[in-house]
Amino acid sequence: METKGHSRHFLYTDWILTETQFDPDQLHSKETVFTIGNGYLGTRGSFEEGYPHALSATFIHGVYDDVPVVYTELVNCPDWLPLVAIVNGERLRLDQGEILQYERKLNLRQGLLSRSLRWRSPSGKTIDFYFERFVSFADQHVLAQRCQLTPVDFDGVIEVQGSINGYTENQGFNHWEGLDQGKTDEGIWLQRRTRNSQIELGMAAKMTISGAQASLQVSTAPGYPTLSMTFLAQAQQTVTVEKLVTVFTSRDIETPVAAAREKLACLPDYAKLLKASEQAWDEVWQQSDIVIEGDSTAAFAVRYNLFGLLIASPRDDEKVSIPAKTLSGFGYRGHIFWDTEIFMLPFFLFTQPAIARNLLSYRWHTLPGARRKASHYRYKGAMFSWESAATGDEVTPRWSLPTDFYGEDVRIWCRDREIHINADIPYAVWNYWQATANDEWMQKYGAEIILDAAIFWGSRVEFNPERQKYEIREVIGTDEYHEFVHNNIFTNRMVQWHLEKAIAVYDWLAHKYPERAKELEEKLQLTSEQQNHWQDIIAKILLFYDPSTELIEQFEGFFQLEDINLADSQGRDRSMQAILGIDKTNKYQVLKQPDVLMLLYLMRGSADFPYSEKALQTNWDYYAPRTDITYGSSLGPAVHAILASDLNISNEAYKLFMQAAMVDLEDNRGNTADGIHGATAGGVWQAVIFGFGGIQFAENRPVAKPHLPPNWTRLKFKLHWQGLWYDFDLHQEVGMGHGAEGQGGRGAGEQGGRGAEENNNSSLLTPNSSLLTPNSSLQTPNSSLNTPNIQGVIFDLDGVLTDTAELHYLAWQKLADEEGIPFNRVANEALRGVSRRASLMLIIGHRPYSEEQIQEMMERKNRYYVELLKNMTSKDLLPGAIALLDELRQAGIKIGIGSASKNARTVIERLGIADKVDAIADGYSVQQPKPAPDLFLYAAKQLGIEPAQSVVVEDAAAGVEAALAAGMWAVGIGPVERVGAAHVVLPSLAGVKWADIRSQLQK
Amino acid sequence: METKGHSRHFLYTDWILTETQFDPDQLHSKETVFTIGNGYLGTRGSFEEGYPHALSATFIHGVYDDVPVVYTELVNCPDWLPLVAIVNGERLRLDQGEILQYERKLNLRQGLLSRSLRWRSPSGKTIDFYFERFVSFADQHVLAQRCQLTPVDFDGVIEVQGSINGYTENQGFNHWEGLDQGKTDEGIWLQRRTRNSQIELGMAAKMTISGAQASLQVSTAPGYPTLSMTFLAQAQQTVTVEKLVTVFTSRDIETPVAAAREKLACLPDYAKLLKASEQAWDEVWQQSDIVIEGDSTAAFAVRYNLFGLLIASPRDDEKVSIPAKTLSGFGYRGHIFWDTEIFMLPFFLFTQPAIARNLLSYRWHTLPGARRKASHYRYKGAMFSWESAATGDEVTPRWSLPTDFYGEDVRIWCRDREIHINADIPYAVWNYWQATANDEWMQKYGAEIILDAAIFWGSRVEFNPERQKYEIREVIGTDEYHEFVHNNIFTNRMVQWHLEKAIAVYDWLAHKYPERAKELEEKLQLTSEQQNHWQDIIAKILLFYDPSTELIEQFEGFFQLEDINLADSQGRDRSMQAILGIDKTNKYQVLKQPDVLMLLYLMRGSADFPYSEKALQTNWDYYAPRTDITYGSSLGPAVHAILASDLNISNEAYKLFMQAAMVDLEDNRGNTADGIHGATAGGVWQAVIFGFGGIQFAENRPVAKPHLPPNWTRLKFKLHWQGLWYDFDLHQEVGMGHGAEGQGGRGAGEQGGRGAEENNNSSLLTPNSSLLTPNSSLQTPNSSLNTPNIQGVIFDLDGVLTDTAELHYLAWQKLADEEGIPFNRVANEALRGVSRRASLMLIIGHRPYSEEQIQEMMERKNRYYVELLKNMTSKDLLPGAIALLDELRQAGIKIGIGSASKNARTVIERLGIADKVDAIADGYSVQQPKPAPDLFLYAAKQLGIEPAQSVVVEDAAAGVEAALAAGMWAVGIGPVERVGAAHVVLPSLAGVKWADIRSQLQK
């Protein structure tokens, strides 16, 4: 019962993420979650004092360097964070001593990361720390830290060391060679250069102190310059140390060290810097914020996702773009994918158009690399790289190399075959142009991208004389579970669309900018034959499509593959590819991510072929159940959420949306350690705006046709369209079903349309022909509705609604200290899920205690525990708990507690949920403990419902067993290994809706 | 004339290598050359104060860690060298300020590396440094440094920082994670652990000072603990700092840090430690030294090669072996090849048998890895890995990956196909047993290796029913220019030999150690069928051999490949594979290294099939001209030298021998930077002992049948054979031709045989059958003898016999200083090969000087230069010069000097060669400078010989041109790009014999 489950120890308020407990097991994912940045650089949320195996990292846009196998990677820059306190000779380190209080906060509005800490050193000194840090949003070269130290119970000598660590690494690899370093009147500086790309970096730092007299020392260990201040600290008196850092690279300026030193010399103080940064943040949020009311988790999560995009978006640099994992982790080595254009770009396009322009200009600057790639593969024009970095050359690794001596290498074919990106980028360019009407940029940058990428297609398609059709063979579509497929619909239709637009762009250019048209004609060798060829391809490209049902075949032969029932694999914790292997997924009708549905989504805005409501319904019914949406691609859920919203399956839409929105906050794919899911974050914005907000661009302006989730009472945001800002403030009366009121205000309050008319702007360019699918037998998912009639839900307490593991630990620690028995957090690990008596036995070991003494100690420990319980508040509720309880009450479902704890009532009161609970079964209620059914049967009886009408929510295996023994429905919280016997398994209650549970139980 | 050519700035005396000048271009190769070690670790000869791009490294045996692509590598351990002086705020660094004097010495007898330095700081302070370091040969965990500082022209504050640098790397990769570090009363310590293999390392250091009062400070930058001493230094007073370091790993002891700290606390002082280490070295040299008289270069070079082996040989560890590049560089990642058993082992076997036993025991300990490899490839028994590390598993990289984005990966097949190592290791085991008669080791270790490796062959061979023969198909022989060949003679015959020995070993074991035999029978599943199968393979394995000519075909179809004339590619600077590509070398009769000849060499000692004098002659004539001996494998020259010696082609033998012996001293393959050529070093020992010493094991003891090179007057060494020591002291009267007197003394002076009888111990196991070669047309090399009648040699002076570039620089510097014109070494680079006047013009630039002033300055500079010339001594002769002059005089060849310098006579006198020179043509002799022929014609006239009887030795293009214009023979010293027009091109005179020049001129 003292197990923690997958709790993230997070509290969400409007703008602030609070971590209430430090869990070393989540070290790396939390470092990602607490990343800060300013569009120039990103710094992971690692501790100032370090921690064993921490993955501290600062990434600066565009600073790439060579590395074996994956060609190039975004370099981990010198670390500006080290700020270490040595208290009476004992260095602050959280893996030693004792953490008495801990709280880490990220303030999204200010871009400020802070941490409060009460630490007891190994020798018993207690001291409070308060750390703050930010990277200036007002001046991207300025980084700042503050540390406040307050001895609690001692006077003593404290030394604070602030360093620049030049020995950072990318998974062991150190990209930097030392050039020089030194000390000046202001502080220290370091000059390094990347080994191969020869990018020079200069970093400088200074440190000030207030509240104590300190002597400053400078040490210059090579690569690790350090400022050190030593002072006499007095109990209960606070000393503040501030460290300011500046950084430049040779990408910015010719002499980075000189620039860093000069800027450092002229900096105002910490407070002024923070204020300037906050103001800059404020301006950005004015445009980009989304307000959600009625769903505090979603409200925070959406902002969190936007924050993740904003800190990584280049505001002053058009030669870089946002990597798949942004600037927050080592995943994908800082390479840039279609993720940016298709998933992230719309957010910028409609709220920060200047950033959108930078991102697309990056593609223009990397055209030479795309041309080299085309030329290498013996094609023409520009062939954009699947993974791109500084130059645009292809940097997708060729091999996935085994680490064991005899393992086989796996060839990665995306670099050669996943070519749809060559239409995705033009798609984004076109949309940028539509949304901004920026003709100047279009003629200079966009047109060349669209045209040269179109030239590539002319050389890539093959004409099949037998079919009299153009084909594109041996590709990988967006669904990467199938390799070397022919005539993937996503690819073929996007090529068709792209060529249509290429002709339109060329016509526009020739008309409006004839000189530029001429210039490009010569540069790209554009001819009228070329355009005739494009027209011919548009007319004759192969698209597998059944006009009667509007069912689309993902690629030639997909329907002939073996079918698979994904429901059979429920409860899995990894992708279908990991389970089946790539050879097998190639043979099954299982998708990593939307492909046909993705195409429908991209064509939805313009309602171009093949988009129609019928096509959406038909293909959703076919493909959604076959898509590995939980562990396939993280690109899937947000897009599915939008389409589900369109289809009015709101519960499904909301569930998929929350799956996307919580991807990093809940680490629900287990890979947040690798960095923020940038594409998911972009998808979340699209799901809110285009899905729930129902924004469409009718009559050449954004119009809302909202489908707000049931509990959202308000959705408020701004959109930028062709030079004007549109305000949307959508409201919904809770409990009134799915209707919602939509208001769109333009500019200074001009009224937009309420709701929106049907979009009649049907495509002018519907293809002339479509082939009947060879095997179009449609298979609908098995959805026999055998709904259980649920009347009540009985919650286990500890591990489900709250987590008292920490309190138990503190109580045991106090007892052990009093008895003089060595005990610490490590020893405490052995007590997880162990009864009170057995725990005590483990603690006392072979020490001779009488049974009487043992009884006394058990009571004593419990007394301490109950005392600690008094400090509990509603903040100690686990994420999602309160929302679910409220929802259940609104739905008229009864709520019971079934806890073996004798303190259950105290806990319930302290948590402030006593008024939400209809019955309590606790440690006094029955004789037989779980897994006997007694406790839950007792609770059901109190609630006045039958076992078959009851759902039990449990986090322990014994609890699930007890529920099943009672003949009740069981929802397991936690890993499948533990609660897999339950009817439904959830990682936690965060974002969980009653409707979801109910619909899952129906299956 | 002031160009340096490829000079290494080396002087060789009995035991001491002296580097007279620091050349940053040779930084990495010199770091390799000056490696020291003690069989536990090796430390490259990098500077204490560092240098930009230095490859400082310390490798400890057995400390491997994972790395991508190449699986595992020997880890660069924390660096114990940093010892940095900061003189009045200026840090000693040789890339700044000015080097006024420089000398680095390696004393092989003591294992002591030292460096004298006079440095002028950028601000003009001059200071003398004398550094020493050694790694104790008496206690392998103890490392020591000493630095003496003497201000020359100032009093000032000096800080000396001694650190342990934990941020060492392997080509950018840092294998270490920090665990802890600290300071104690004694000094500092560092605790690190390898990332994956989890080997813990503890290092501790302390520092003492004498000659000044200093304050000690300790700084603890993470990963870079530093001891710092600051003192007031006075001009002309010497201060001495000594730094002692201890190191342990968890391979040695459970608590490495504690062990390092404890040992450090109890260490005696530097002087005592050095004395103990010297005594330990002395004992080793007592057994392993070789004395050569009459050829000081060879005498030193041989000792240098033995030193390279001794510092890398594990004396107390039987779970490690010597990597291909020893413990001295990053090449081949510390992997272990057949190089150890076949090339290095004999040296140890006959002079340090306990080390030989350790090396072979390593193979026994790694049998589990060899079995895993066999099992992976679905074979039986033990399949030893082509590249092996800690576990014996195969660690040859599978791919050679391109660094550019579109380059193709090249598959490395050695891991799968180069299987002859599986017989090479048993060959070494058998020889160890023969030489030591160590039955105890054989029954416990050796037998299992031989038998389980034999079991592999039983599963690897294929029976061809049509031929009624066993075949081994698709292998790579020792000649790696041919892949996937069938029935490579080296492999097939070694397998046959191995199976013969396996049967013999098994019989012996069953007879002498029946219990062990039974144990192995069960463990290895040895059966009598197995042995019958071996017998059958021995009888029927396919060997392509022509009994009439005794010509052997390297593999099936080799003679049908296209022939190639390597002479056509003379003057190349890379391998034939680099020139042709692997696909082409596969199709030509060109060898990377001896294959048939290698087999003959391995069978030579026992005169087993196919060895015979006739076979040797026939196959030498065929294969030697087809072998890429210069740039193919470095394994080739020593083996060819031995066989050439057997064939009485002494000049060729000596030339090949020196090619091997100088491989690292001269960096003649350009890859010394990667580490010492361990196999070549072992080959050098074999060439001296088995080639020139002619050692054979007749009548069960070593007997000498020497073929000493012409100039060797004495060759003295010891051999250990079956428990007894044999002393050899071979003499030769110079000028008496190739005969030599051999003396072998056993034990305490017992007489061995003089010379040796013919070895009549013909093989009992000659194979029953041999196939006629399909295409046995023999091609002899073209050797028409058209000897020129050479009567005299005319040497250019500067760049050939000596190098005055440094003196010119110093003279120009003095002039420039006096004129207040900025000038330094960098500016001096522009003056190479530029005349005095033109040099001056470059220096003064646009400054307005009258012609009179220019004349004066030219004279002034020359005056300074002539003054500096007075300091020249015979030490300033370039390597090889004096030996060649002496040899020419003995051969009655006249010697002239042809130098454009007006100071030639002064230089000749200072160099002490005036009495060796018959005529001098200098800057006063003729009007027309080179490339006019006048100067050399003048010299020839003085010598009284005809141009056609004259050889000119020149290092400048104009000089070669002059020689040719004079109708003389030209020998060019330096790169082909410069002196390629000459008849013969040599990198330098080091090791050059008159006979070689003559024989080359004959071609």
Image (cartoon, coloured by chain):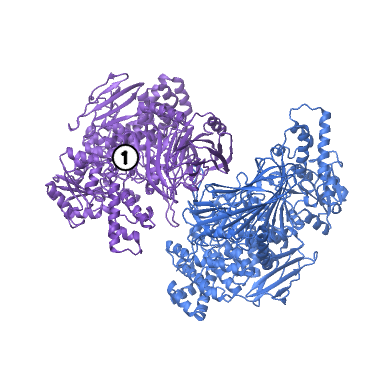
Chain colours: A purple, B blue
Mark 1 lies on residue: A11
The residue closer to the viewer here, A512 or B401, is B401
Give the residue displayed 40% in from the left and 25% down from the top: A506
Q: Determine whether A880 is above or below B659 in the image.
A: above
* Figure label count: 1
Tell me if residue A730 can be seen: yes
Q: Please rate how many residues cluster around mark 1, counting C-alpha atoms within 10 Å: few if below 14, some from 14 to 19, many from 20.
A: some
The residue closer to the viewer here, B705 or A655, is A655
Q: Is residue A47 left or right of residue A954?
A: right
The furthest residue to the bottom: B511
- Chain letter of disc 1? A
Q: Determine whether A501 is above or below B965 in the image.
A: above
Q: Is residue B879 left or right of residue A803?
A: right
Q: Is residue A945 left or right of residue A617?
A: left
Percent coordinates x, y for residue A678 in the rendering: 37, 37
Amino acid type of the residue that numbered disc 1 sits on in the rendered structure: Leu
Percent coordinates x, y for residue B945 in the rendering: 86, 51
